[in-house]
Amino acid sequence: MRVKRLAPTVLTSIFILASCAGERGAPPKARIEEVVVHKVEMGETWGSIAADFYGDADRGGELAVYNGTEPENEPVAGTGVRVPLAEADIEYFEKRLDATDAYNLGLELASKGDFGEAVEQFGKALRICPFFPDASFNLSVTYQKLGLHGKAAEELEMLVEKVPRNPVYLFALGSSLFHTGDLEGARRYFLESLSADAGYLKALYSLAVVCEKTGRKDEAVRHWNEYLRRAQDGEWAKEAKTRLGRLTEGGGG
């Protein structure tokens, strides 16, 4: 199963079919037919993983217990969690695979620059499987590439409600709002992106830009200095130095 995201960031979810040996915690009430090992991505929770595999976020607690932990102990990005599948779950998962076929076709079309058809395929994937974060994200990015930033923002707003702590999703929403002229909204989501991942330099750079444009000179100077401290030789360091220089010399942004 190929599951990727388009720029600004490409991440991969890894789904590995495994045997059901070595179960931990209390098993679900239904008989387990398969166990899937899922690599946790940034921002995922037990609830979002349960929604992804079962179509039911309320089963997140059950999933946490199965992995030998309490529901309040959210899974750590980069680790593998075991997802037991009963017969009904497998049927849902197979439907998810059908959605993934449409999603992957959308990726291929987008990579060729056929963004209109890519939108259709991502939409098809979401009609088959409404909770499909990668499809939602890539649909929004494709809207951005078409210049439809308002539609991208609408899609991303729904996505961050379902997956609230993913810095990439939050940044993308801030970017779309920026391009619609909603600078206060953009600032909010760049800040939230940094709250989720303090090292996300794209969000820090963009936050400095939006602070300039909204007249927050002192805040902009602070963020530019922080960006340059972390990325002295980064791809946007030259522009950051220029912008910082204009502000500290008494100019405007």
Image (cartoon, grey):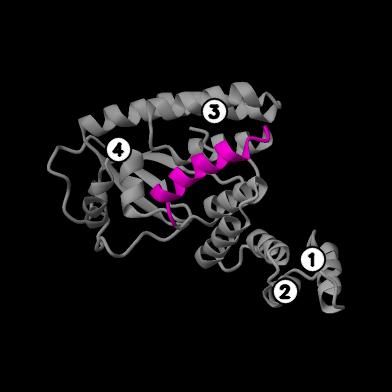
Q: Is residue 229 magenta?
A: no
Mark 3 neighbour class, 10 Å CA radius: few under 14, some 14 to 19, many 20 or more: many
What residue type is disc 4 on? Gly
Please name which of the two marks, 4 or 1, marks the residue nearer to the observer: 1
The residue labelled by disc 4 is 55
Q: Residue furthest left?
A: 29
* SS under mark 4: loop
Earlier along the polypeptide chain: callout 3 or callout 2?
3
Q: CA distance from mark 4 to mark 2?
A: 46 Å
The residue labelled by disc 3 is 104
At 52% from the left edge and 28% from the top edge, which residue is drawn?
122
The answer to whether the residue labelled 4 contacts the one labelled 2, judged by CB atoms less than 8 Å apart, is no
The answer to whether the residue labelled 1 contacts the one labelled 3, judged by CB atoms less than 8 Å apart, is no
Please name which of the two marks, 1 or 3, marks the residue nearer to the observer: 1
Earlier along the polypeptide chain: callout 4 or callout 1?
4
Quarter the C terminus occupies: bottom right
Q: Is residue 26 left or right of residue 101?
A: left
